[in-house]
Image (cartoon, rainbow, N blue to C red):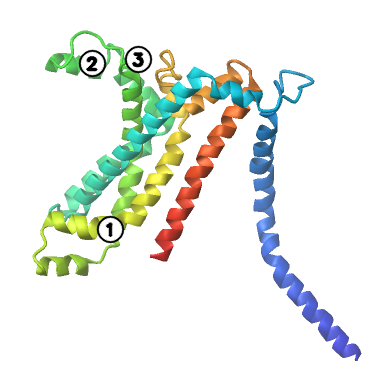
Amino acid sequence: MKKLKQQNRKTTMFKFKRTATPYLYLAPTMVLFFALMLVPVVTVVGYSFFDNVIMNRHPVFDGLNNYRMILTDPVFYESLLNTAIFVGMSVVAHITLGMFFALLLNSSLLHAIPKAIYRVIYIIPWVFTVSIIAVLWRLLLNPNGVITYFLNVLGTVQGHIDWLGSRDTALGVVTFVNIWSGYPFYLVSILAGLQGISNQLYEAATVDGAGTFQKLVFITIPQLKPILMSLTILDCIWTTQQYALVWMLTGGGPVHATEMISTYTYKLAFSSYEFSRASASAVIVLMISLLLIFLYVKAQKAREST
């Protein structure tokens, strides 16, 4: 009887250890997640319901007033529109350029050496950090810089143009720089997808008399559809949260011409010291990001099921 009880105890202990071991491995990650993500998010959400935290020693519960002030602020809607334009143009250009260069590098028309050289050239923007990219383009886009000089030589423009200081050009230029700095990631991702497509599909299509365009439309794009969907949603998430590049290029100016949701929120907190309104703005950004993440997860599940 004692032996049976001891055997049952050992079995119970073994099952408990076996069940608890994975949670012990996960514990450090869960502690970091709780301390670095969950607590700050809950804190910011709580701040958004008070009149002015941090600056006010005894903040008073203010309900949804901060959200009302944000949603009635014309600058917020201007930043929202700028962000939509910035994200839309960047995502379309990233996927288009990534697809074009990936098809070029995957083509059998190029030999191995030119492919290796082109890969190095196309990946160069990805090597630089955001700060280097911002400084580099600020120098190039200076009214007395190289770009203005060559455009004057070519006769495209006349005089000195302040590319980053004009409301007419600032948003387009910032979007262009973001496209230039980000497309290599999509190139590499799409190229990996292209190399995973079986050659037998193309050979069968050739036998059936399909041309290059037909192969692209009926084989390449359908095979890449899950990857393209995932990349599009990921790009929307990352570009929506782009802050450093915009801040170092224009700081959201001139006169809110390049104001994004991220720079708008930063200015509320650290320029105007309205931390409660900044928290409300951050919560709105969080809701937009959660929606995009939901779409991304859904796309990933669809990709795994195919």
Residue drawn at (60%, 24%) of the image: 68
The amino acid type, in three-letter code, at marker 3 is Arg
The amino acid type, in three-letter code, at marker 2 is Thr
Of residues 146 and 297, the one nearer the viewer is 297
Of residues 135 and 22, the one nearer the viewer is 22
Which is more N-terminal, label 2 or label 1?
2
Dot 2 falls on a residue whose secondary structure is helix
Q: In which quadrant of the rendered image does the N terminus lie?
A: bottom right
Residue under numbered circle 2: 148
Using the rendered view, name the quadrant where residue 286 is placed.
Answer: top right
Residue drawn at (38%, 23%) of the image: 135
Q: How many marks?
A: 3
Dot 1 falls on a residue whose secondary structure is helix
Residue drawn at (85%, 89%) of the image: 4
Using the rendered view, name the quadrant where residue 148 is placed.
Answer: top left
In the rendered image, residue 127, in percent from the top left (x then y), is placed at: 37, 38
Residue under numbered circle 3: 167
In the rendered image, residue 31, in percent from the top left (x then y), is placed at: 69, 49
| Furthest-left residue in this view | 209
| Furthest-top residue in this view | 159
Residue under numbered circle 1: 222
Residue drawn at (61%, 26%) of the image: 67
Q: In which quadrant of the rendered image does the C terminus lie?
A: bottom left
Residue 85 vs residue 45: left or right?
left
| Furthest-bottom residue in this view | 1
How far is mark 1 from mark 2, CA to CA?
Answer: 42 Å
Residue 247 showing in the rendered view: no
Residue 143 vs residue 31: left or right?
left
In the rendered image, residue 117, in percent from the top left (x then y), is placed at: 22, 45
